[in-house]
Image (tube, rainbow, N blue to C red):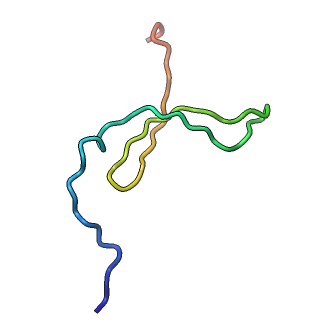
Amino acid sequence: MTFDRNIQTVRPQSSWTEIWHLWTVIVPRRSINGQLVIGKVWRRHDGRDWIYRKFTEYDSEAA
């Protein structure tokens, strides 16, 4: 008897998995001027993995 490890179990997603939240990340790498690389991303969990999206800030007065 063989067992297929690629089969995913079907579970209903929790409501919190659909919510994007702002997450600050610190990359363990130095920039050109020697500082740590820090940024913000949108992040949510799809029930299995974390999904990240680029966060783009804009000037509210220019919009």
Question: Which percent across, then down, holds residue 60?
Answer: 45, 11
Quadrant, the C terminus:
top left
Would residue 36 appear left or right of 2 to someone viewing this image?
right
Instruction: Give the residue furthest to the top.
Output: 61
Say which of 41 and 13 sits in front. 13
Quarter residue 53 falls in: top left
- The answer to whether 17 is drawn above or below residue 1 in the figure is above
- The answer to whether 21 is drawn above or below residue 48 in the figure is above
Would residue 17 appear left or right of 52 to someone viewing this image?
left
Question: Disc count in the image?
Answer: 0
Identified at 44% across, 35% down, the residue is: 42
Question: Which percent across, then down, holds residue 46?
Answer: 33, 50
Say which of 17 and 61 sits in front. 17
Question: Which percent across, then down, holds residue 50?
Answer: 42, 49
Identified at 56% across, 37% down, the residue is: 25
Identified at 53% across, 33% down, the residue is: 24
- The answer to whether 47 is drawn above or below residue 2 in the figure is above
Say which of 56 and 50 sits in front. 50
Quarter residue 34 falls in: top right
Question: Which percent across, then down, holds residue 52?
Answer: 45, 43
Would residue 37 appear left or right of 6 to someone viewing this image?
right
Quarter residue 37 falls in: top right
Quadrant, the N terminus:
bottom left
- The answer to whether 32 is drawn above or below residue 62 in the figure is below
Identified at 29% across, 67% down, the residue is: 8
